[in-house]
């Protein structure tokens, strides 16, 4: 079966996952993490993509982004992917592929899922039992949103600014949001939609989004359509 083209729409928020091939490590040193972050920053700027949140895990990474034009996401990920593989192979004297094929992505309904997706991203290292709390992990955007450091890669979404009237209020509100966690249903929905490429949101949002693209953006119902009930003569 032919693969569906990626769903990429200007002005919409996208959750992106890129995995290492066979779940192998994609970083061998702190310098590798820093180099990938710099690549993301450069290509996001050049391709007019706002990066709202990120986390770099040992064998994959997550991004929450908004492209300003439809092809921006694809161009950014292609540039980042190719440049990082060239760097990584050269740096570690290896050859061959590093990524598990294409990146995966979904379009999110902003009001319903954006803040949950940010928390989901920041809690990845905690779910993986790498750290006790997101504040202990250095390779995510959590520190930027909680006032620990300024991160030039991050462009806060307007919904973050609505969390409070002062920087302290926003930072405290966001920290509380992350500490509250993401419920299992939302976590599974974010994972499944991203890996399968389906839009994630309420039915009205998905229906409206479908009008903006010729690509199917939601899972079709399994099985054959139900048969019409038999007709009996009276």
Image (cartoon, helix red, strand yellow):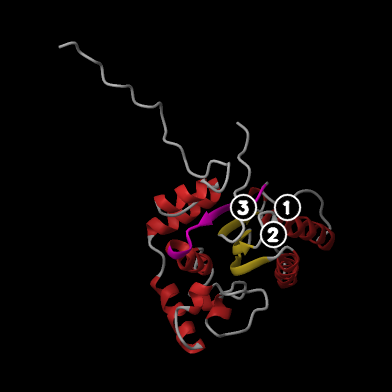
Q: Is residue 37 left or right of residue 145?
A: right
Residue at image coords 41%, 51%:
204
Point out the residue furthest to the top here.
233
Screen quadrant of the N terminus:
top right
Q: Quadrant of the C terminus?
A: top left
Image: magenta residue range: 102-111
In the picture, the disc for residue 98 is: 1
Residue under label 3: 8
Q: Are marks 3 and 1 in contact (CB under 8 Å)?
A: no
Q: Nearer the viewer, mark 3 or mark 2?
A: 3
Give the image location of residue 90, x and y in percent. 84, 60
Residue 38's tag is none
Q: Work out whether 116 lies above or below 201.
A: below
Residue 27, position in %: x, y?
70, 63
Circle on res. 26: 2
Mark 3 Cα shell of 10 Å, populated few (<14), some (14-19), many (≥20): many
Secondary structure of the residue carrying numbered label 3? loop
Horizontal and vertical percent position of residue 161: 50, 79
Mark toward the viewer: 3 or 1: 3
Residue situated in front as seen by the camera: 65 or 149? 65
Measured as percent of width and height from the top left, residue 200 is found at: 47, 53
Within 10 Å of the Cα at label 1, are there few (<14), some (14-19), or many (20+) other Cα atoms? many
Q: Is residue 27 above or below residue 215?
A: below
Q: Secondary structure at mark 2?
A: loop
Viewer-proximal residue, 163 or 213? 213
- Res 111 → quadrant: bottom left
Identified at 44% across, 54% down, the residue is 201
Q: Are marks 1 and 2 in contact (CB under 8 Å)?
A: yes
Name the side, left or right, on which 214 lies relative to 176.
right
Separation of residues labelled 3 and 1 (CA atoms) = 24 Å
Q: Earlier in the sequence, mark 3 or mark 2?
A: 3
């Amino acid at each position: 079966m032919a693969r569906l083209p990626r769903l990429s729409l200007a002005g919409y928020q996208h959750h992106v996952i890129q995995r290492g091939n066979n779940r192998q490590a994609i970083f061998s040193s702190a310098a590798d993490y820093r180099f990938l972050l710099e690549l993301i920053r450069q290509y996001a700027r050049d391709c007019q993509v706002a990066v709202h949140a990120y986390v770099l895990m040992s064998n994959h990474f997550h991004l929450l982004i908004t492209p300003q034009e439809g092809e921006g996401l694809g161009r950014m990920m292609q540039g980042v992917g190719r440049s990082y593989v060239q760097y990584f192979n050269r740096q570690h004297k290896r050859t061959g592929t590093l990524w598990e094929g294409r990146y995966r992505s979904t379009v999110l309904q902003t009001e319903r899922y954006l803040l949950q997706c940010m928390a989901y991203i920041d809690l990845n290292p905690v779910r993986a039992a790498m750290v006790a709390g997101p504040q202990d992990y250095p390779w995510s955007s959590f520190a930027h949103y909680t006032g620990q450091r300024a991160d030039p890669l991050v462009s806060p979404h307007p919904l973050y600014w609505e969390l409070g009237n002062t920087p302290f209020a926003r930072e405290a509100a966001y920290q509380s949001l992350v500490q509250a966690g993401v419920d299992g249903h939302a976590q599974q929905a974010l994972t499944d939609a991203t890996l399968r490429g389906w839009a994630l949101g309420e039915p009205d949002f998905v229906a409206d989004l479908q009008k903006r693209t010729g690509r199917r953006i939601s899972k079709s119902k399994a099985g054959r359509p139900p048969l019409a009930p038999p007709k009996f003569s009276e």
